[in-house]
Image (cartoon, rainbow, N blue to C red):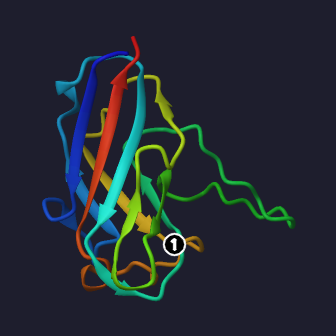
């Protein structure tokens, strides 16, 4: 096992765009050694009341991933989205005291050929239909914490 770095992204410390869906962060990646990395993450939101059962998709412009979107049967391409797919999270339940979460083993690992270099980067949240209404405001979902775990491979 290589050296492990945990980068904590708290939406309350980031710069939120129009709402919680788009949050900009700064991190000086030169603090990490150059090399190949395995990236995993955990995610949890604040509690809120919801009837929403939609999966929350998490995107970033932090790094290039080897994740691609399948096309629908008529051949419409889905690969023009501005951010790279990081993974997904789900609601704990419906009703009061719900939260959205993704434990460390919920998504697949992402392998990076080098440490990230984009010091200013965005985390973008969207539902399954890339419809911005499902998780669109801090009053609905509340702030979140996203912990990126990068393990140096060599």
Front residue of this view, candidates 50 and 113: 50
Q: Position of residue 68 (x, y in %)?
A: 64, 47
Q: Secondary structure at mark 1?
A: loop
Residue drawn at 24 percent across, 36 percent down: 6
Q: Which residue is mark 1?
A: 127
* Residue 68 seen in the current view: yes
- The image quadrant that residue 133 belongs to is bottom left
* Residue 115 seen in the current view: no
Which image quarter is the N terminus in? top left
Q: Is residue 97 left or right of residue 57?
A: left
- The image quadrant that residue 47 belongs to is bottom left
Residue drawn at 39 percent across, 62 percent down: 101
Front residue of this view, candidates 133 and 51: 51
Residue drawn at 50 percent across, 36 percent down: 109
Front residue of this view, candidates 143 and 47: 47
Q: Position of residue 144 (x, y in %)?
A: 26, 64
| Depicted 111 relative to depicted 57: above or below | above
Which image quarter is the C terminus in? top left
Q: Position of residue 134 (x, y in %)?
A: 46, 81
| Depicted 91 relative to depicted 39: above or below | below
Hey, which residue is sitting farthest top in the picture? 154
Q: Position of residue 42 (x, y in %)?
A: 36, 49
Q: Residues within 10 Å of mark 1 (few under 14, many from 20)?
A: many
Hey, which residue is sitting farthest right in the picture? 74
């Amino acid at each position: 096992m290589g050296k492990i770095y945990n980068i904590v992204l708290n939406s309350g410390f980031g710069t939120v765009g129009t709402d919680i869906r788009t949050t900009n962060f700064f991190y000086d990646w030169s603090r990490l050694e150059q090399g190949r990395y395995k990236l995993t993450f955990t995610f949890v939101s604040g509690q809120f009341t919801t009837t929403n059962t939609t999966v929350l998709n998490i995107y970033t412009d932090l790094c290039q991933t080897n994740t691609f979107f399948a096309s629908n049967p008529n051949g419409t391409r889905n690969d023009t989205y501005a951010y790279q797919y990081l993974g997904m999270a789900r609601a704990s339940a419906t009703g009061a005291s719900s939260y959205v979460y993704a434990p460390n083993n919920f998504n697949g690992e992402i392998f990076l050929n080098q440490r990230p270099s984009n010091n200013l980067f965005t985390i973008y949240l969207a539902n399954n239909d890339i419809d911005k209404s499902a998780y669109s405001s801090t009053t609905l979902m509340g702030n979140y914490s996203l912990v990126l775990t990068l393990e140096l491979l060599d």
